[in-house]
Amino acid sequence: MSDPAPKLWIKIRLAGGEIGPGKITLLKRVAEHHSIAAAARSMGMSYRRAWLLLDEINKICGESLVETFSGGHARGGARLTPLGEKVVVLFDRASDQAEAGAAEAMAALRQLLSSKGG
């Protein structure tokens, strides 16, 4: 069995805070489920926590990345704005590029440490 590929943890720091993998995952789940409540449940967090995180993301970016719409139980929901979609795509691209760029050094580090630990 091979070891899983190393994952780098990237955070984008802006004047109002930072956006990292957790917030990006929340955005992805909103896009997937079309609902803040369902996105929160899929991540094991409360609706309130998800709502606060999305509010924080919107404040950090100075613009909404998620928009909500009402219409009752069956018609309400949420979706990413065009900016939200771009942020997710670019964050994923940056993560992929960082991991690809660090792959050789990470492999050498893994080999060095595994030879020391048995």
Image (cartoon, rainbow, N blue to C red):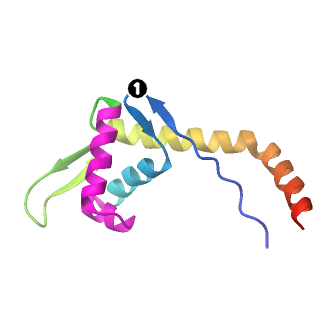
Which residue is at 43% across, 28% downward? 14
Q: Position of residue 71 (x, y in %)?
A: 8, 57
Secondary element at image label 1: loop
Please provide percent x and percent y for residue 76: 14, 58
Corner quadrant of residue 93:
top right
Kind of residue at disc 1: Ala
Asked if residue 3 is among those painted magenta in the image, a careful observer would answer no
Which residue appears farthest toward the bottom when viewing the image?
Answer: 1
Residue tagged 1:
15
Would residue 108 appear left or right of 43 to someone viewing this image? right
Q: Quadrant of residue 67?
A: top left
Q: Nearer the viewer, residue 93 or 11?
A: 11
Residue 42 image position (x, y, % from top left): 37, 67
Magenta highlight: main SS:
helix
Q: Residue at x 27, y 43 (%)?
A: 55
Highlighted range, magenta: 33-60
